[in-house]
Amino acid sequence: MGSSDRRMNSRYCYNFFRLGHGLENLKPLERLCVAEFLCETDSLLIEDLKPEWAGRIAEDLSAKLVFIESLYGPFADQVFPSSVALSVGINRLSFISSHFIQPDLFIRVKRGHEASVEQALAVINLSFRKDDNQTLALPNGSKLQELQHVAGSFEVQDRSSQRSLDGLHVPVGQSWWDCCAASGGKSLLLLDEYPVSELLVSDSRLSILRNLDARFEQAKVSLPYRKKILDLSQPIAHLMQNDAFDGIILDAPCTGSGTWGRTPEMLTQFNPSILTSFNTLQRDIARHVVPYLKSGGTLVYITCSVFLEENEAVADFIEKELGLIPLQQQVIAGYAQRADTMFVAQFKKP
């Protein structure tokens, strides 16, 4: 296939997946027409196969959903797994509807580099929306290769992820542990916003931490940091020695259900039975890291999930079983800003 054909087939596949389990009784081509109609504002497929819909394809999504349901009956609630409870505060219909809209690509600009990054974007005529000085939203699929001369001045990081540490109070000189660090996005956010003097990053595989090293090098991180390979599903006392921290970031492994607007194939691949495994893992990790939090220290529990079992249920466990004092918890409802949806809970150790 040529590049144009590949792009069109990719678009058809992604739009088709966005229907999740909705309208599964329809033939595939009919479902694809529905998906194209809901997800796009113009479509040759619609013009060829559903010309009577073509005059409505540019309407807003809510009107198009009403129109499709007038033809096929209610289906929106079938798009996203309906048997699993969502976190408190999530508007189910708004959240489900967001899966028909491609999320934006967000970058976080390092403090002091705002002018240079915005100028670089202007030079290559790449449009962006400025949410605040550090948060820029770009069209999804934007090519960032032409910004190599300002590499290290920004990080690709979702809008909601950029707000996951909001409300923290981090005095100068504190020690922090990013215990499920992955490629280090939360650590970089912490270092850019707060005067941390000591940082430990850990994850379960060396290859992950090597990726973190490369990202830290590009970001020109000057703070010396320590690394450990840790399987936090198991006790770690023999590996932690006398470590103790003023703060711990627990960005827990989860279903990623708040990000399925970017990976819509997960709408049909997800099996609700896996929630029990994630809930157990999240509790185990919390149980194994809390002993290394100093008295008066802060634990930040984060997921990119919308499921109550991974969010409020684990937060309740941290409070009642591990004895931490809840400070605040919230759903970051990114679906209203073409971003991911996340859950964040902050705790203090007595």
Image (cartoon, grey):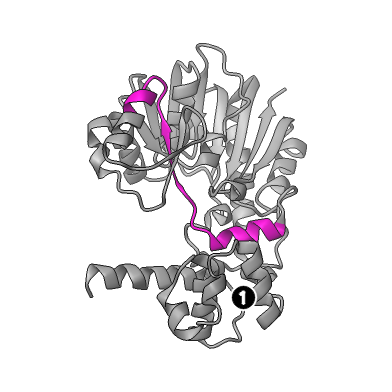
- Label 1: how many Cα within 10 Å (few below 14, some 14–19, many 20+): some
- Front-most of 164 and 40? 40
307 in the magenta segment: no
The stretch in magenta equals: 92-117
Residue that numbered label 1 is attached to: 22
SS of the residue at dot 1?
Answer: loop
Position of residue 70 measured from the top left corner of the image (x, y, whole percent): 70, 78
Q: Is residue 260 above or below residue 162?
A: below
Q: Is residue 69 above or below residue 106?
A: below
- Front-most of 292 and 133? 133
As shown in the figure, which amino acid type bears the numbered disc 1? Gly
Q: Quadrant of residue 345?
A: top right
Q: Is residue 271 above or below residue 216?
A: below
Residue 325 horizontal side relative to residue 28, left or right? right
**Number of labelled discs?**
1
Q: Is residue 347 visible?
A: yes
